Image (cartoon, coloured by chain):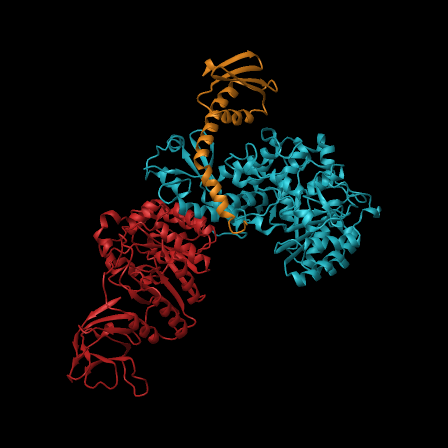
Amino acid sequence: MSYQILPYRFERFDDEVFMSNEVGEYLYLPSDDFGKFVNHELKPDSDSYNTLKSKQIISDNNTEDVLEMLSIKYRTKKHFLTQFTSLHMIVVSLRCNSNCSYCQVSKKDINDLNFDMDKETAKNVVDKIFESPSPNIKIEFQGGEPLLDFEIIKFIIEKAEWKNIFKKKNLEFVICTNLTLMDEKMLKWLKGHKVYISTSIDGPLELHDKNRPLFNSEHSYEEVVDKINLTRKYLGNDSVSALMTTTSFSLNKFPDIIETYRELGFNSIFLRSLNPYGFAKRDKHFLAYPMEDFLENYKQGLDYIINLNLQGIYFAEDFATILLSRILTPFSTGFVDLQSPAGIAIAGVIYDYDGDVYVSDEGRMLASVGDKKFKIGNVKENSYQEIFNGDYLHSLIEQSVAESLPQCSTCAYLPYCGADPVRNYNEQGDLIGHRPTSEICKKNMGVIKYLLSLLKKNDSNLNRIFWSWIIRKPIEE
Amino acid sequence: MKQLKSNPNNIDETVIGKIVKQTSMFHSKKNCILVTDEAKKQNGYSAIISNKIIDTNVIGVELDELGELNNNDIVTIDADGIINIIHEANSKHNAIFITGRCNSNCIMCPQPPVKEEADRHDLNLKHISLLPKDTISIGITGGEPTLIGNKLFEIIVHIKKSLPKTYINILSNGIRFENIEYARNFAQNINQNTVVDIPLYSDVDTIHNEIVGSKTFNRTIKGIYNLAKFNVKIGIRIVVHKMNYKRLPQLAEYIYFNFPFVYQIAFMQMEPIGNALDNIEKLWIDPIDYNEELENAIKILHYRDLHVSIYNSQLCILSEKMRKFAVKSISEWKNIYVDDCEECILKPDCPGFFASSKDYHSRGIKSIKEIQACV
Amino acid sequence: MKEIIKKIEENKMLLKIDSSLYDKEALLQASYKFTDKCYLNIELVDNHFEIYFESKNDSENLEKIALNFGNEIIDQQIRLQTGREFKEVREQLVKKAFSSISK
């Protein structure tokens, strides 16, 4: 019986081949059977034949029906497209009281008020935000240190809430802050509105202080921890989330960093590599590290976290959770940094203090060192259509569809990955990028393949732990 | 359903009614059937079931085993004296039998389909009217209920009206719902308390079709999708036997990827009766021998936060972790031919055996005297 | 295998591939993957592709690269071949997936 080969991608291993279908469902096929499959010689009703049918990589009598099912699943996977821009980042001020070693935002002096967003700009920003068709709107305040201009934060929140009475979106606010300037007065005000806090903890005291010193204090870590507790007191235990950034000083310390997160009452961590912008690029000779080193540390960190879970402690790694959702579920995952088409402007967008609009926060970082390639308009000068539906953005998006990028298009892990044109441009000189030398490809593929190797063990406990992260609650044995 | 043979007296057409075992001048006799030792007077009852009919004018039947009938059971009495107990008052698993016809021909069907039958529609409507108002759930079964077409909607609407809070569980192969209009009409007629349980026996079309006896895999799936379009709650049922046990984990994954919206999934131990008995060589596997695959499949679905159950499985042959998924789904405790069960501490929660499992049950049946403490 | 590899110098080699067996596209896709480790130059000579490899740094094992290249071009040819078979299906799939919003 002849069969139709349906869209798939593959990678060869020693005696088997990893195959994935168009929506990321995968299987391992013995090498011999793969050869037969390609030559249309695979025996019907054999295990391999049946599994390929089940994963919709071959069909023999019902291609139309299978196509129907695949298209529904494909639409589901790309669902983030239908929402359009839901993450709106606003740089309320470039002033900062911190002196992070890897500062990526080109912060300004704490007294230089020229770098605060003014009310007129803020009003225009809010207007543009609410022109987004997305039913979910998350407004994320960034900086510099946003709390330095708390007044404009209040102004924006109030304007947005007012507009939302008519627009009726699912509206959420996040402040990305080092928290050191938070006080009770601010917290009391924030309590009345749906605001979450995202802060940075790079590790235990010594490491954090080394990576993220403050300008006017020797006690960066202690102050942040103090303010985390204060914030939780007013806004609730789940109101604060934290991120870490890996510098060369963080290497070999991942277990300690994880323990710090646990002590501080967090139940997850995002093990992030260093983005090569701003000071991180300028000082990469002592801050940066080969991607292989990050990957080794990442795996160690992940193993450490898995062990915690095996001991009954619920703790997740956020990057793994996102990738596992893509590998194991039929659902769309909104992660603007790694999706196809890239999330630039169409999923997440950033408004600078002066009203300039950039496709991503990395795009804005490039602008702050002089390269405005990723500016798509200004809230005071351009209409929503000009900014978000203009030819320039279209051309950027066209070059950020992984399905049509060299090497990505046939990569077995494409369904789990994405495109990052800003990073490609920054590191390799053009939007398309050069995959064989791409650090970001190395990282993503490294993590994806490690997760797949863990899944291949078919270990019940491991699977249970991974799923507990995906469904966001512990699963009893 | 339980059936009794009796000697009819003056039964012209099928009588349906609720069993009453004690007379009282205060209760309504309408639609009631009295069970008594000696039948002397009609007294307004629709029929009388007794040991001995004294007055030959009485409409009723003679039956020895009066103990088989309980108060508030609902029965039909046919002209030939067959008594069908269509509702058992003491059982949680009652259903409306829509039709004996079916458009599938499953190799393990416990109740092989008929080609022709008398119209049951009015009888069923009456049946629904007689159901106790506190009925928690009611099934709609067959054969294949959707074969009565739009009349099925009347049944559902009547249940909704008489028993607004009752859960309705419809067993269907889903094929008729491949017609989007039928699916739409169906969805408009049901309420939030309704679930449609559809069997899917494999992730591979050829295996499913071989079991079902017709090439309907794709049509069933289309039916599932159509129902999902209208937000109907859908359950998937899998009867486990030799032809499909090997791919249970793959089927679990297939269900999750393709029908993530599914409301519940049930794995069912096979009842060795009817077609199943005729084809027992192809079908029989000791359930203990498919425990590994079953456990894998259940874990797959459970980890993905889906509601999964095991029906008709004795608890002793399941591993301890799996027992919490087992449902006490067999309504009768008959013929406990393994004396051991009497001493088993799990007996109160165990579904026990089908009466038909006498010759075909697991070699692993044993009483559990104590539960191992968790480590 | 060794006959098709011709070592020129310590860090340079020439690989000959029968051009009747592989599409040019497969050759290019395979070559692309090695542009991190080597500089490549490709020419069609008679009925052979001649691929010239020069390693970018001394630590690269050219022979291993040649062996991997041989396997890689087979895989790329497979991708090309089966890709032609399902190209239409993929286009249909994406079209269908977005049919409700396309105008």
- Residue ranking furthest to the front: C103
Chain displayed in cyan? A
Image quarter where the N terminus of chain B lies is bottom left
Chain displayed in orange? C
**Quick one: B359 or B229, which is closer to the camera?**
B229
**Quick one: B66 or B5, which is closer to the camera?**
B5
- Residue ranking furthest to the top: C8
Residue B106 lies left or right of residue A362; in this view the side is: left
Residue B290 image offset from top left, x and y in percent:
33, 47
Q: In the rendering, what colour is chain B?
A: red
Height in image: A429 above or below A140? Answer: above
Residue B23 lies left or right of residue C88; in this view the side is: left
**Quick one: A452 or B231, which is closer to the camera?**
B231
Specify whether residue B314 is in view: yes
Residue at the spot x=43%, y=72% of the render? B164
Residue A193 image offset from top left, x and y in percent:
69, 60
Query: Residue A440 sits in which quadrant?
Result: top right
Residue at the spot x=69%, y=60% of the render? A163
